[in-house]
Image (tube, helix red, strand yellow):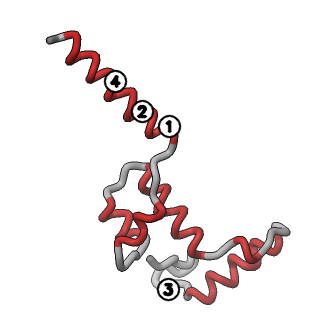
Amino acid sequence: MPLYSPFNRKECHSRYTLNKVLDKCVYKAELSLSDYSWHSFRRGAAVFAFELGLADSAVQLLGDWASPAFKNYLEFSFLRKFSVAEKNAHSFSYHVNHL
């Protein structure tokens, strides 16, 4: 997915330019360059979109993933797991009480 310039929305930044910007930001923040890459941002964006409830196909499209490999990065957060368990518990108790 291209990242557009705020000054000219018709031109995309190259991967090289984006890597240079990332390197500069990480350096200025006095962090280790070896700990950050654009891949980690892609992965993070995929997880974030998944947590928002986007369909797998939308996550794949937004991340420009050619294969379903992005699914290896997705996992439910504790809060999401708890929410699903809570909904199932209410449903179960409703059915038990109405037998």
Asked if the residue under mark 4 is in contact with the one under mark 1, i.e. CB atoms within 8 Å, the reply is no
Residue 31 vs residue 98: left or right?
right
Which tag is nearer the camera, tag 4 or tag 3? 4
In this view, 28 is above or below 14: above
Q: Could you tell me which secondary element the residue under label 1 belongs to?
A: helix
What amino acid type should be assigned to the residue bearing mark 2? Ser
Q: Residues within 10 Å of mark 2 (few under 14, many from 20)?
A: few
Which tag is nearer the camera, tag 2 or tag 3? 2
What amino acid type should be assigned to the residue bearing mark 1? Leu
Asked if the residue under mark 3 is in contact with the one under mark 4, i.e. CB atoms within 8 Å, the reply is no
Kindly identify the residue that appears in the image at 33 percent across and 63 percent down: 58
Kindly identify the residue that appears in the image at 44 percent across and 65 percent down: 72
Which tag is nearer the camera, tag 1 or tag 4? 4
The span from disc 2 to disc 4 (Cα, nearest Å) is 10 Å
Kindly identify the residue that appears in the image at 69 percent across and 84 percent down: 20
Residue 95 x %, y %: 20, 18
- For the residue pair 11 and 32, the one nearer the viewer reads as 32
Q: Which residue is mark 1?
A: 79
What amino acid type should be assigned to the residue bearing mark 4? Ala
Q: Which residue is mark 4?
A: 89
The mark that comes first in sequence, 1 or 4, is 1
Q: Which residue is mark 3?
A: 11
What amino acid type should be assigned to the residue bearing mark 3? Glu
The span from disc 1 to disc 4 (Cα, nearest Å) is 15 Å
